[in-house]
């Protein structure tokens, strides 16, 4: 073997998964040419192999030096020799497949050889059923690197990298491979910047205020606590306040009345204030407004001031937010008819609620089109059919127009609703375990922050990372700031696709959470080229440096064109900012 052109040297030290190799003085060249290909010895990140009988052990070069890492007095070193530190990654027995992990350890004086392109083809193998191509190996344009789709999706994965390192392009590559390769696949992409529509012309794109596919997240998907918070700023601890108790009673009553639903009638006994059942939020406002403003013919006693005793002049119209009118009590002495309403509990809630309903930025939540209320034609099964039941395979939820203060609850609701549908549908033939789903979260650090204790989206996404696999939900997070992402989420990531990462705290996240302890490869993170990734973890046979192909059409970055705009002369005009101010006042585009 020593005469072979691939011979590199021999082992001088073994330390668990790391070995040290002394490169032989006899090798003819530091850059041998084998089968017409040039190999450079001692390139960090390249592979070496150690044959032991019919077992072939593979390792990755992690450092190179001209002195050994530990000098041993009993050994005479050849000055000028080179020493390679190698991390062992896996082995191949006979003609079997390459497998991660080491069963047989090499020992001192074992031979170490260069890995040729042919060896790499043997390791990486061909595309088999259940795999997708991620890209090409950095050392060889012809060598495709595949991922095990099952593990990539259901063991969850992450695409990490600094801005401009190629995350969005990688996301497109992976989703494209999935939807082009598997006709029954389904993916939901949560797209906070609205950048992916251009990359996927065939996807179903839901967007706020869109004519064809408007994005609706019905407010009644919220639990009572969530709704009370978003409508009137109430906290669960407000339970002692009469207005909070009444709000719960009202909402429960409305939901219980509406048990005959599009997706099927349900037993009202099971309905609570938290049940995802439509009701009319305008009616809720109308009721609050009614009790606040009513005047009564009965008496000043609160419990005698009932609906029947009201001195109504006109009923109003809840759909158009017109309150009922009552005979005025102001001009008459307080002790005579009609009497002023003693029901003042909703004094502060009523105005807050009205503000929310009128704020058009929240229309996708509080006026969700055909999902608006109990009279609506559509129910939640229609929503699921639109998002994950259509034949588009990919649904992009473009959250570009979602106001920042509700982005968290919006993503939380989407994730929880989709997860719940997979949980309760886990045994149905068309969903759950029988038709898995991938949920991809772009810009994950903005709503899955580890220090954010009150994040709805984080709670919902963490649940997918912890439990999703059992019900067929997998997840992919995409982020430029992994060090800011919830640790629960990172700990459950099975496969890391790490593009160039310049920030050292972000690098250490990958170092610490990556399943294969391969610091040598991870140390390359700051020096990777655009579109080049270190991929480690469960879905990939061997940790690899991979070039991801550039996709066309591309996602669009929402960045303004600064130079272009600053290169033009803009003439001042007093009319200029009128439209801006009008929109700002009406909160309407
Ligand atoms: N695999 C690639 N090969 C070549 N160029 C790439 C590749 N990926 C990205 N780029 C280039 O880098 C730019 C930024 O890529 P993008 O995917 O938007 O990065 P990120 O999402 O990390 O900010 C792209 O517009 C493209 O020009
Ligand atoms: Mg991006």
Image: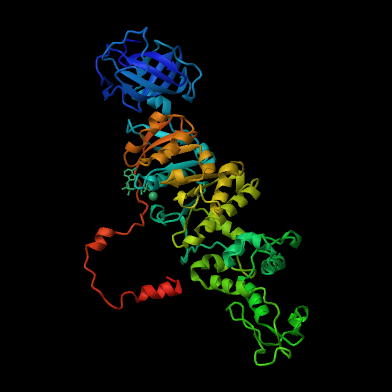
Q: Quadrant of the C terminus?
A: bottom left
Residue displayed at 34% across by 57% down: 559
Query: Residue 424, image x and y in percent?
Result: 65, 50
Q: Is residue 327 visible?
A: yes
Which residue corresponds to the image point at 46% horizontal and 16% vertical from the top-left? 55
Displayed quadrant of residue 519: top left
In the rendered image of this protein, does residue 334 appear above or below residue 535? Answer: below
Q: Quadrant of residue 473?
A: top right
Q: Is residue 506 above or below residue 561?
A: above
Q: Tally the marks.
A: 0
Residue 144 or residue 348, whichever sits in front: 348
Of 577 and 10, the residue lying toward us: 577
Q: Is residue 389 visible?
A: no
Left or right of 270, for residue 565: left
The image position of residue 331, as x and y in percent, is 65, 92
Residue 189 x, y percent position in the rendering: 48, 51
Residue found 39% across the figure and 29% down from its top: 520
């Amino acid at each position: 073997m020593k005469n072979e052109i691939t011979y590199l040297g021999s082992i001088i030290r073994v330390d668990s998964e790391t070995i040290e190799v002394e490169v032989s003085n006899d090798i003819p060249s530091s850059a041998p040419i084998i089968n017409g290909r040039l190999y450079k010895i001692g390139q960090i990140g390249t592979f070496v192999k150690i044959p032991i009988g019919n077992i072939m052990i593979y390792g990755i070069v992690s450092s190179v030096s001209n002195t050994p890492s530990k000098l041993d007095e009993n050994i005479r070193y050849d000055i000028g020799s080179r020493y390679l530190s190698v991390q062992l990654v896996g082995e191949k027995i006979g003609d079997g497949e390459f497998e991660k992990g080491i069963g047989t350890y090499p020992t001192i004086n074992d031979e170490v050889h260069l890995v040729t392109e042919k060896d790499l083809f043997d390791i990486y193998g061909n595309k088999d059923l259940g795999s997708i191509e991620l890209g090409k190996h950095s050392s060889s344009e012809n060598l495709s690197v595949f991922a095990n789709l099952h593990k990539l999706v259901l063991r969850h994965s992450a695409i990490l990298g600094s801005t401009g390192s190629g995350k969005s392009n990688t996301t497109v590559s992976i989703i494209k491979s999935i939807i082009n390769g598997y006709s029954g696949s389904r993916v939901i992409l949560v797209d906070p910047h609205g950048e992916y529509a251009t990359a996927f012309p065939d996807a179903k794109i839901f967007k706020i205020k869109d004519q064809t596919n408007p994005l609706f997240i019905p407010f009644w998907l919220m639990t009572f606590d969530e709704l009370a918070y978003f409508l009137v700023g109430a906290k669960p601890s407000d339970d002692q306040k009469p207005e909070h108790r009444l709000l719960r009673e009202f909402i429960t009553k409305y939901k219980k009345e509406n048990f005959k639903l599009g997706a099927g009638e349900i037993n009202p006994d099971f309905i609570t204030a938290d049940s995802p059942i439509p009701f009319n939020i305008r009616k809720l406002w109308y009721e609050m407004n009614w009790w606040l403003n009513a005047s009564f013919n009965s008496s000043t006693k609160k419990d005698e001031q009932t609906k029947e005793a009201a001195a109504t002049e006109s009923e109003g119209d809840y759909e158009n937010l017109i309150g009922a009118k009552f005979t005025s009590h102001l001009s008459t002495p307080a002790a005579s008819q009609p009497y002023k309403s003693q029901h003042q509990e909703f004094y502060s809630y009523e105005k807050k609620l009205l503000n929310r309903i009128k704020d058009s930025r929240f229309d996708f939540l509080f006026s969700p089109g055909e999902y608006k209320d109990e009279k609506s034609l559509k129910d939640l099964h229609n929503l699921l059919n639109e998002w994950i039941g259509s034949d588009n395979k990919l649904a992009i939820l473009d959250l570009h127009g979602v106001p920042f203060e509700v982005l968290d609850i919006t993503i939380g609701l989407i994730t929880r609703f989709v997860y719940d549908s997979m949980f309760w549908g886990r045994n149905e033939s068309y969903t759950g375990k029988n038709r898995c789903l991938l949920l991809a979260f772009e810009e994950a650090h903005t709503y899955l922050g580890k220090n954010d204790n009150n994040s709805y989206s984080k709670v919902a996404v963490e649940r997918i990372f912890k439990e999703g696999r059992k019900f067929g939900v997998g997840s992919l997070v995409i982020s430029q700031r992994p060090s800011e992402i919830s640790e629960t989420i990172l700990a459950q990531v099975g496969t890391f696709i790490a593009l160039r990462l310049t920030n050292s705290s972000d690098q250490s996240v990958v170092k610490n959470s990556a399943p294969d302890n391969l610091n040598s490869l991870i140390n390359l993170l700051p020096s990777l080229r655009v579109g080049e990734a270190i991929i480690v973890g469960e879905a990939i046979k061997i940790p690899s440096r991979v070039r991801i192909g550039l996709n066309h059409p591309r996602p669009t970055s929402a960045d303004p064109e600064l130079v272009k705009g600053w290169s033009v002369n803009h003439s001042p005009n007093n009319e200029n900012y009128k439209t801006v101010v009008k929109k700002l006042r009406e909160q309407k585009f």
